[in-house]
Image (tube, helix red, strand yellow):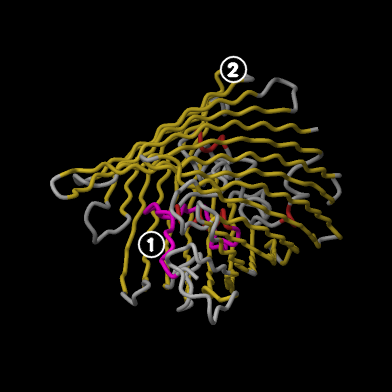
Amino acid sequence: MRVSIRSYLAVLPLALLATLAPDASAQYLEYRADELGVPVDPAARGIRLLAMGGMRFTIPDENNEITLSDFGQNIAGIASDKDGWSVESWFSRSRTVDESSRLVGDETLRDRLALTSEVMNNRVIYRNGSGRAVGSSFQWVAHSTSDRYGDRSKIRGPLLQAFWNESIGDLALGLSLQRWTDRQSLVSPDVFSIQHRSDVFGWTVAGSYPVAFLELGAQATIERVTIEGSSRDASGFHQDDLEWLRPTKKFRFSAFLPNGGDLELGVNLSTFTLDGAEEANISWSRQFPGNPGGFQFDRKVPTFEEEESGTRIEARALYWLGWAPRVSGFVAHESRSSDVTESPNFIGSRRQGSLDRSRNEIGGGLGTSLFDEELTLAVEGMGIFTTDDTVDLYGAKAQTKARDVSGRVGFEWFTRPDFILRGGYERLLLDSDVDGPFTLQTGQAASVGFGWVPKGATYVLDGLFRYVDRTPDETGGEERDGFELAVYGRLLF
């Protein structure tokens, strides 16, 4: 049995994006994306809004409405979201590169870590116009990291989903079945590296019902998660197999004002719990120098146990002033805790430690449409403030406060009846540790996009290019450059 510490992939010091709900990162790809601070699906908000500078709240968009289906993410609202058939496809590719300098003796070394993400999504839904909807989706997600020495990790896999929504009078019901698989491949020469592959089966039940002047919704998701890992030395003398179980429960409750008035308002309350554990099926080889003798050898040993839970409450509003301008607002509070207890005999996929997170978000904006809605303009601001209390492997306690403040302006212009030009500009301020040195970054992002809507046609084509540049406020801090390319198509009939 090997007792040396297994090396783990480096984690980028990023804050989670505001669009992520406090769901458990059950799948291994989600777990790694959560560590890296990137969304699993960067195009989830809609390519149209990303092309307008990353608008979140102010611009009306059929994929980002304050409804049970969009903001509430409740499958009981699918039938009422659109009419007839809808076929949607999009592909997004993004790449970010972080560079920093460190002094080793008298020599300055330049560190580099690149993250590449690719997402492809296809979704088909049929709605009969009388409260019934059935559909399916296929999504492919891939994340890869590399440093200045070459590739380090690749994680990729598909998500398959089938869903049904039926209205019985005022009561709407929904059912969804999901299946995820993903596989991690490492090209690191480290003998202690662990390769993971996960298999997730989930089912969701949901419902909604109007009460007084509100539409209320509830949704529950149960996931059966199995993550298998293996580590093997290059010569093939030694391999350990690990099984990591992460059963997860998620609940979401929503309340909305019915659309049609000057005020649109929605509130979500989300919770999750996760109780996981990993067990190692270890091997013993006389050829491996770190192994003890073969006597009193136990083949299966526990590696760690984990407990995670979280709660998030969020509210979003959009108010139409009765003339062109509209005002939006968003607030959210999230709390999350994680505790990992490690086995004293064998080190697995996670190390011992605990995390208690408190996160507050606030945002809003102002938008208007001019010239018979040929030109749309908007400005928004967003602030995310996070406090993490951690206890590491050796019992050392620490508190880290982070902030992420941004402002953006964007436009959409119908240059022709069938062609739309979009653009946006963002100013960014990020500090991963308010009290620490070399953590403050300032930056900017520019985006440009187009839309093609042929007259009388039932299909739409959107495109996007976005570039981000962040620089450290102090010499020796981390620099970031990145871009995103995306294309979206929709067919309605």
Amino acid at circle 2: Arg
Q: Is residue 18 magenta?
A: yes
Quadrant in which residue 281 is drawn: bottom right
First along the sequence among labels 1 and 2: 1
Q: Residue at x 56, y 64 (%)?
A: 240
Quadrant in which residue 396 is drawn: bottom left
Of the 4 image quadrants, the one containing the C terminus is: top right
Q: Residues within 10 Å of mark 2 (few under 14, many from 20)?
A: few
Q: Relative to the observer, which residue lies in front, 122 or 45? A: 122
Q: Relative to the observer, which residue lies in front, 423 or 239? A: 239
Give the residue at the far top of this rendering: 416
* In this view, the mark in front (1 or 2): 1
Q: Which residues are magenta?
A: 3-27
In what element is the residue under mark 1?
Answer: strand
CA separation in Å, label 1 and label 2 = 44 Å
In what element is the residue under mark 2?
Answer: strand
Which x, y percent locates residue 97?
Answer: 38, 39
Which x, y percent locates residue 159?
Answer: 68, 49
For residue 73, side relative to residue 366 (left or right): right
Whether 490 is drawn above or below 142: the answer is above
Q: Relative to the observer, which residue lies in front, 441 or 306? A: 306
Give the residue at the far bottom of this rendering: 296
Residue identifier under label 2: 416
Quadrant in which residue 256 is drawn: bottom right
Q: Which mark is residue 386?
A: 1
Amino acid at circle 1: Thr
